[in-house]
Image (cartoon, rainbow, N blue to C red):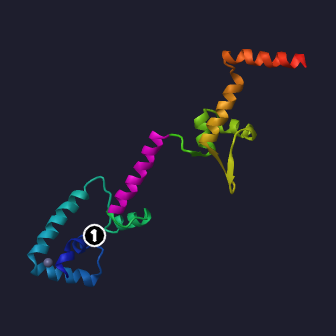
Amino acid sequence: MNCENRKIILSAYLDGEVTAEEKREIEEHLKKCSVCSNELKKLQKISSLLKEPPKIKLSSQFEKRLKEKLNISSESDILKKLSQTLGKIKEKIEKPHPEIMTIGDLSSYLQISVEAIWRCLREIPSFKIGDQLRFRKKSIDEWLRKKEASHYEPYEKEPEIKMELFEEFRV
Ligand SMILES: [Zn+2]
């Protein structure tokens, strides 16, 4: 047995995850090596603490399998993934409405339901990539400004409109 790998090997030994031959080899080594036998005692202490209720047993394979499931190979990858996720959350908080919006984004931006958007989809500027419907925030804002203008006529424009009407009557 290689002393450098003793922590891994000894914890596998404690968990009964070694072959009969490995077990015999380890026990042979433990008789001769005080460093490893002390290490084993420490591990046994930790292990007995961990085995107290609640009785959740995580095998030495657990971390490996978890990492495989999460598709990450090292701790720095975990940190990278975490910081990416945090970055995305931060972005959402700071800029809740992205430049290119999905129908869900638009629904929250306009404060109206997705169904209502579907109903008046023809008048809302949108574009498709493949079968994916998207809205550009800039175009939506422009469209909103036009919509606002048609609902609201400022006072100073009133005489101008009247002049035009008057002009029409003269012809
Ligand atoms: Zn040793």
| Up/down of 33 relative to 108, above or below | below
| Up/down of 151 relative to 67, above or below | above
Q: Is residue 56 left or right of residue 89?
A: left
Q: Quadrant of ligand 1?
A: bottom left
Which residue is at the front of the view, 28 or 108?
A: 108
Residue 70's x, y, as percent? 43, 62
Residue 59's x, y, as percent? 32, 66
Which residue is at the front of the view, 169 or 126?
A: 169
Q: Splitting the image into 4 quarters, where does residue 15 fall?
A: bottom left
Residue 125's x, y, as percent? 69, 42
Q: Which region of the structure is painted magenta? A: 76-95
Question: Is residue 79 on the magenta stretch?
Answer: yes
Q: Is residue 148 left or right of residue 26?
A: right
Question: Is residue 13 on the magenta stretch?
Answer: no
Residue 26's x, y, as percent? 20, 80
Indicate the secondary structure of the residue bearing disc 1. Answer: loop
Which residue is at the front of the view, 3 or 37?
A: 3
The structure residue drawn at horizontal position 28% and vertical position 53%, both measured from the top left corner, is 53
Q: Amino acid at mark 1?
A: Asp
Q: Does the residue tagged 1 have its C-beta within 8 Å of any atom of ligand 1?
A: no
| Up/down of 93 relative to 82, above or below | above
Q: Is residue 149 left or right of residue 53?
A: right
Count the numbered circles shown: 1
Q: Splitting the image into 4 quarters, where does residue 137 fall?
A: top right
Which residue was labeled with disc 1? 15
The structure residue drawn at horizontal position 68% and vertical position 21%, both measured from the top left corner, is 152
